[in-house]
Image (cartoon, helix red, strand yellow):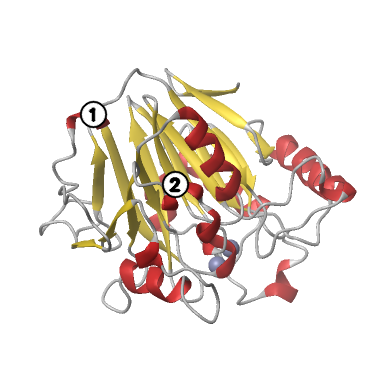
Amino acid sequence: MDDSGTLRRPLGELRALNLQACVDAADPPSDRAPLDASFKVRFWGTRGSIPVCGEAFRRYGGNTPCIEMICGGRSLLFDAGTGIKPAGVALRERGARDLQLFFTHFHYDHVIGLPFFVPLYDPAIRLEIWSGHLAGKMSTQEMLRGLMREPWFPIEISMCRAALLSRDFHSGDVLRPMPGVEIKTGSLNHPGGCIGYRVEFGGRSVALISDTEHVEGVLDPTILRLIDGADLVIYDAAYTEEELPRKKGFGHSTWQQGVKLCKAAGARKLALFHHDPFRNDAGLAELEALAKAAFAGAFTARDGQTLAIAARRTAQRA
Ligand SMILES: [Zn+2]
Ligand SMILES: [Zn+2]
């Protein structure tokens, strides 16, 4: 893969876990075609590191990362933190059958909700699961088998009744999970590796850049490529610049860096994301006000929030 994201080799490997009918994702079934032109983003979990609950976290919520991007009525999920539990219930109620789940990486806060994702246990569901941050070291299937097994969990992934397909890719690959949707990928600076995503649909783009730690005074060229002119950038704003010296090497960034990157890349909106579990609603509201003053398109993402990504490269709250 060169830096422009051009594919030099056939896309990753397809592995079937308990596959009933193998369909190569490079040739998606026709019922995956977009139903309309809408592009929505729903935040099911916005907290980093560990879930939190209680009165002090009521406004922004406490579920760990899970984001749903709904492209033409078809759902793409990103990460399986505790936010994927309510996402699964909502998808079941909507009657969604054909699902895609992309992992940024496998740290606990991004995978711990997976065993409680109800579509896993529904034989009517086809679920394709993608990862790329450990390419050549651990496959998506190995992670799934390791996550769901004794003594950590009583149900093994092979016991799930949904048709599961695991997909492996390399950072820099361009993924085409369904007609009209293109996903660019790149490596982020995080212990153990992490993938940043840019989802493009109908001339609009949303980038998910979490988890990542920036180097002071440097705008990461991979991130700039992924967020270039994006309608919405979802960014790891776990800390502030004042806090960062005490958090060196933790693998996270700041709202100030998110603002700098968005300004440099000409992005429209910035969602502060992966909230520090020690920061309560008042603290997050304070960061939101500071970020907004520096960049008008900035806001603090909250659990349950839905954004409609409007045509002509603007995003509005739904
Ligand atoms: Zn995390
Ligand atoms: Zn992490």
Give the residue at mark 2.
119
Quadrant location, the N terminus = bottom left
Note whether residue 248 is visible: yes
Q: In this view, does 255 lie to the left or right of 148?
A: right
Q: Which residue is at 72% across, 42% downward? A: 291
Tell us which disc is closer to us: 1 or 2: 2
Density class for disc 2 (Cα within 10 Å; few <14, some 14-19, many ≥20) is many
Disc 1: which residue: 31
Q: Is residue 137 above or below residue 9?
A: below
| Mark 2 CB lies closer than 8 A to ligand 1 | no
* Position of residue 254 in the picture relative to residue 277 (left or right): left
Labels 1 and 2: the sequence-earlier one: 1
Q: Position of residue 40 (x, y in %)?
A: 48, 28
Q: Where is residue 214 in the image (x, y as percent from the top left)?
A: 55, 64
Q: In this view, does 220 lie above or below 92?
A: below
Q: Does the residue labelled 1 lie within 8 Å of ligand 1?
A: no
Q: Is mark 2 on a helix, strand or loop?
A: helix
Classed neighbour count for the residue bearing mark 1: other residues with Cα under 10 Å, few (<14), some (14–19), many (≥20): few
Residue nearest the viewer, comparing 170 with 101: 101
Q: Where is residue 71 in the image (x, y as percent from the top left)?
A: 38, 29
